[in-house]
């Protein structure tokens, strides 16, 4: 039903930037709200950013305190793609980053119905 593929991860030095992409199947944006989460071994999946939107309509954005001012979430409806621009990266940003689809906008990973496979982001000192 819903298929999402993350890309853009990699290895960068502290202070560098990466742009993550989440390509979604054709009608995902018309049915679900989209967000970014991250996870490190041994810890729960952590909220990063969410588009407070459903379908084609954007209402705003929300960010975790740890990334506010450094990360920007956006989407291109025509390309069925969501983005996460990450600037001023820190070693503590190292994680696998996932895009998720939810019936309603949420910061709670338990409310998400579908996930991509994730993309690794590693920030070195």
Image (cartoon, rainbow, N blue to C red):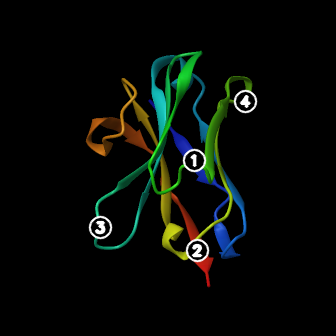
Query: Does residue 5 lie above or below 12 as drawn?
Result: above
Residue with the mark numbered 3:
43
Alpha carbon separation for disc pair 1 and 2:
19 Å
Q: Residue at x 52, y 67 (%)?
A: 93
Q: Nearer the viewer, mark 3 or mark 4?
A: 3
Q: Is residue 50 left or right of residue 6?
A: left
Question: Quick check: 102 left or right of 20?
Answer: left
Q: Residues within 10 Å of mark 2 (few under 14, many from 20)?
A: some
**For the C terminus, which image quadrant?**
bottom right
Depicted 60 relative to depicted 114: above or below: above
Q: Do the residues under discs 2 and 4 have CB atoms within 8 angstroms? A: no
Query: Which residue is disc 1 drawn over?
Result: 5
Q: Position of residue 34 (x, y in %)?
A: 49, 33
Which residue is painted at 60% across and 75% down in the image?
123
The nearer-to-camera label among 2 and 4 is: 2
- Splitting the image into 4 quarters, where does residue 44 fall? bottom left
Contact, CB < 8 Å: mark 1 with mark 2?
no
Q: CA distance from mark 3 to mark 4?
A: 33 Å
Percent of width and height locating residue 71:
61, 50
| Of residues 10 and 4, the one drawn nearer to the viewer in this rendering | 10
The tag earlier along the polypeptide, 3 or 1, is 1
Lower position in the chain sequence, tag 2 or tag 3: 3
First in residue order: circle 1 vs circle 2: 1
Give the CA separation, mark 3 to mark 1.
22 Å
- First in sequence: mark 2 vs mark 4: 4
Tag 4's secondary structure? Answer: helix
Q: Which residue is mark 4?
A: 79
Q: Quadrant of the N terminus?
A: top left
Pair 3/1: label in front: 3
114 displayed left or right of 94: left
Q: Is residue 116 something one can see in this rendering?
A: no
**Which residue is label 2 attached to?**
122
């Amino acid at each position: 039903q819903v298929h999402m593929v993350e890309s853009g991860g990699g290895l960068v030095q502290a202070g560098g930037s990466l742009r993550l992409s989440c390509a979604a199947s054709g009608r995902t944006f018309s049915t679900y709200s989209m967000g970014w989460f991250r996870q490190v071994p041994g810890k729960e999946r952590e909220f990063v950013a969410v588009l407070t939107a459903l379908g084609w309509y954007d209402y705003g954005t929300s960010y975790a305190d740890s990334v506010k001012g450094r990360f920007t979430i956006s989407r291109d409806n025509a390309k069925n793609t969501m983005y996460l621009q990450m600037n001023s990266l820190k070693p503590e940003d190292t994680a696998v980053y996932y895009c998720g689809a939810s019936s309603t906008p949420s910061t709670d990973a338990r409310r998400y119905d579908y996930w991509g496979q994730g993309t690794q982001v590693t920030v070195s000192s």
